[in-house]
Image: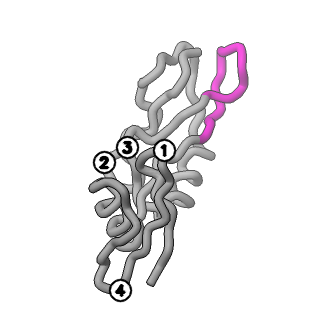
Amino acid sequence: MTTIICTVCPKGCHLNVDENFNVTGHECKRGIEYGRDELQNPVRVVTSTVRITGAIHRRLPVKTAAPIPKSLIDDAMLLLERVEAAAPVKVGDIIIEDICDTGVPFVASRSM
């Protein structure tokens, strides 16, 4: 039995997930899906920064456009170390097209 805290809604239910991925402790249906997914294939939205030239600030905030597998976060961060954007950049502009063959891009989360 594994206990996790659900982050899907503000309630923060304490979920218990057994070895057959049966979920208890949820107050909404989304908690069931979250509990199963968190143990079978955990995913996260990754936020970070990249270097930028020609802007008022030296770093541009970026994030993944969708969650990526938690196991790929370190590889995704390594990709960002090699990136340098050039101003002007608008919110939503694609900074890296495809993160680790997931089909998910890194996008700008601020205009500069």
Q: Earlier in the sequence, mark 4 or mark 2?
A: 4
User: Which secondary structure, mark 4?
Assistant: loop
Q: Image check: 51 left or right of 69?
A: right
Distance of label 3 from label 1 (alpha carbons): 20 Å
The residue that disc 1 covers is 10
Amino acid type for the residue under numbered disc 3:
Ala
The residue that disc 2 covers is 103
Amino acid type for the residue under numbered disc 2:
Gly
Amino acid type for the residue under numbered disc 1:
Pro
Distance of label 4 from label 2 (alpha carbons): 31 Å
Distance of label 1 from label 2 (alpha carbons): 29 Å
Q: Earlier in the sequence, mark 4 or mark 1?
A: 1
Q: Residue at x 62, y 36 (%)?
A: 49
Q: Nearer the viewer, mark 1 or mark 2?
A: 1
Q: Image check: 94 left or right of 82?
A: left
Magenta segment includes 55: yes
The residue that disc 3 covers is 66
Q: Image check: 77 left or right of 9?
A: right
Quadrant of the image containing the N terminus: bottom left
Q: Which residues are magenta?
A: 48-60
Q: Earlier in the sequence, mark 4 or mark 3?
A: 4
What x and y, as percent, mark residue 95? 47, 33
Magenta segment includes 31: no
Distance of label 4 from label 3 (alpha carbons): 28 Å
Amino acid type for the residue under numbered disc 4:
Glu
**Residue 17 vertical position relative to residue 14 in the rendered view, above or below:** below
Q: Are marks 4 and 3 in contact (CB under 8 Å)?
A: no
